[in-house]
Image: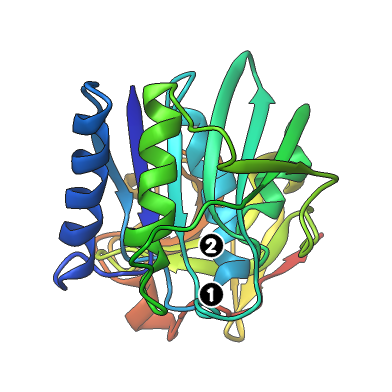
Amino acid sequence: MMIALFTDFGADDIYVGQMKAALLTHAAREGRDVGIVDVLHRVPDYDARGAAHLLAALHGAYPDGTVFLSVVDPGVGSEREPVVVMTQMDGKTQWFVGPDNGLLSVIAARASHARTYRITWRPAGLSASFHGRDLFAPVAAWLASGEVPAGTLEETSGLQVRLDAGDLAEIVYVDHYGNALTGLRADAVADDARLRVAQVELTRARVFSDVPEGQAFWYVNSIGLVEIAVNRGSAAAQLGLRPGHVVQVLA
């Protein structure tokens, strides 16, 4: 079974390794082998809203039964609830473990069917500031192994924090090339539409090589989102883009 990690921890700090160790430890106790895949650890810091749209675009590449350990949790240790969401969509059942702060609400709303559970179990040594390792990781490992102990989850009527699940006309992520992913799904934007961002108007190109070197444009990326790019350059640097920048769709 596969566990997919989606966090704002950064790949160069100590946190991802600790969380993977917790996952493997709990999976070993159940006598199960699990595969761990790093979806992304550079989600914009603390940005549960943008991350919710990014997660909703990324999950489709992962197989039936995948458990997503999703941690963008600036409210860790507060009264926010730890939750599990089970979704059914496009013939797949997937599980999402994380905080009830909006992060899982877009994927839940877009699913053809979803069930929500509050995590009622608490470990003996729960850190106030690292629920990803101490609380979410064990639950994700149990879900992946198919052996969730009784009393771990309690079904609820839904998430407490529910974001607008429509398209988000903002930059939600900038990759290391400087390409800027938006929260706009491709089918929401006409091919001949112009985009305005950072006082610049952009037209669509199919691929990078369709425009001259150094020219900015928008295109439909490989996960179905509208993305802003520069051929052989950085859209982030050239246009001054960053997560949260508003993108306007022009007729």
Please state if 219 lies on the left or on the right of 166 as rendered. left
Q: How crowded is mark 1: few (under 14 residues within 10 Å), some or many (20 or more)?
A: some
Q: Which amino acid does label 2 sit on?
A: Ala
Classify residue 43 by image quadrant. Answer: bottom left
Give the CA distance from mark 1 to mark 2: 6 Å
Q: Report if residue 2 is visible in the image.
A: yes
Residue positioned 35% across, 37% down in the render: 141
Disc 1 on helix, strand or loop?
Answer: loop
Q: Pointer 1 and pointer 2: residues touching (CB < 8 Å)?
A: yes
The colour scheme applied to this rendered structure is rainbow
Please state if 18 lies on the left or on the right of 231 as rendered. left
Question: Residue 47 got which mark?
Answer: 1
Q: Report if residue 211 is visible in the image.
A: no
Q: Name the residue under label 2.
A: 51
Tell me where residue 51 appears, x and y as whole percent. Answer: 53, 62
Q: Which residue appears farthest toward the right when viewing the image?
A: 157
Tell me where residue 180 appears, x and y as whole percent. Answer: 44, 65
Which image quarter is the N terminus in?
A: top left
